[in-house]
């Protein structure tokens, strides 16, 4: 039973890391898009 728990914890850990990376990349892409919009508006 402990082994199953370890496997589940590993899967959850990987999913959390994936979600975190996804969130970070969305923030980075989002800020890039905002900067482009600002540049287009000022030109």
Image (cartoon, grey):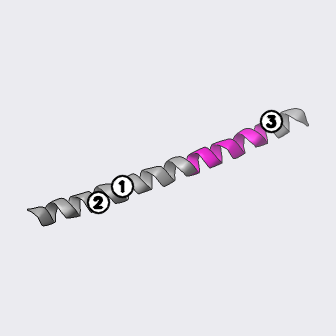
Instruction: Answer whether labels 1 and 3 touch (C-beta < 8 Å).
Output: no
Near-viewer residue (9 or 39):
9
Looking at the rendered structure, which numbered label has been put on residue 36? Answer: none
Q: Secondary structure at mark 1?
A: helix
Q: Which residue appears at 43% of the width and 50% of the height?
A: 19
Dot 2 corresponds to which residue? Answer: 11
How far apart are labels 2 and 3 at the CA level?
41 Å
Q: Secondary structure at mark 2?
A: helix
Q: Residue furthest bottom?
A: 3
Q: Quadrant of residue 17?
A: bottom left
Principal secondary structure, stretch drawn in magenta: helix
Dot 1 corresponds to which residue? Answer: 15
Q: Residues within 10 Å of mark 1 (few under 14, many from 20)?
A: few
Q: Which residue appears at 59% of the width and 44% of the height?
A: 27
Q: Which residue appears at 14% of the width and 63% of the height?
A: 4
Instruction: Answer whether labels 2 and 1 touch (C-beta < 8 Å).
Output: yes
Dot 3 corresponds to which residue? Answer: 38
Residue 32 x, y percent position in the rendering:
71, 46
Q: Is residue 3 above or below residue 25?
A: below
Quadrant the N terminus occupies:
bottom left
Residue 6 x, y percent position in the rendering:
20, 63
Q: Residues within 10 Å of mark 3 (few under 14, many from 20)?
A: few
Q: Is residue 26 found inside the magenta-colored segment of the image?
A: yes
Q: Is residue 12 found inside the magenta-colored segment of the image?
A: no
Q: Which residue appears at 68% of the width and 42% of the height?
A: 31
Residue 38 x, y percent position in the rendering:
80, 36
Q: Which residues are magenta?
A: 25-37
Q: Secondary structure at mark 3?
A: helix
Q: Nearer the viewer, mark 1 or mark 3?
A: 1
Q: Residue furthest right?
A: 43
Q: Earlier in the sequence, mark 2 or mark 3?
A: 2
């Amino acid at each position: 039973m402990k082994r199953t728990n370890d496997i589940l914890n590993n899967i959850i850990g990987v999913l959390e890391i994936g979600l975190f990376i996804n969130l970070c990349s969305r923030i980075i892409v989002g800020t890039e898009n905002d900067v482009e919009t600002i540049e287009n508006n000022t030109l």
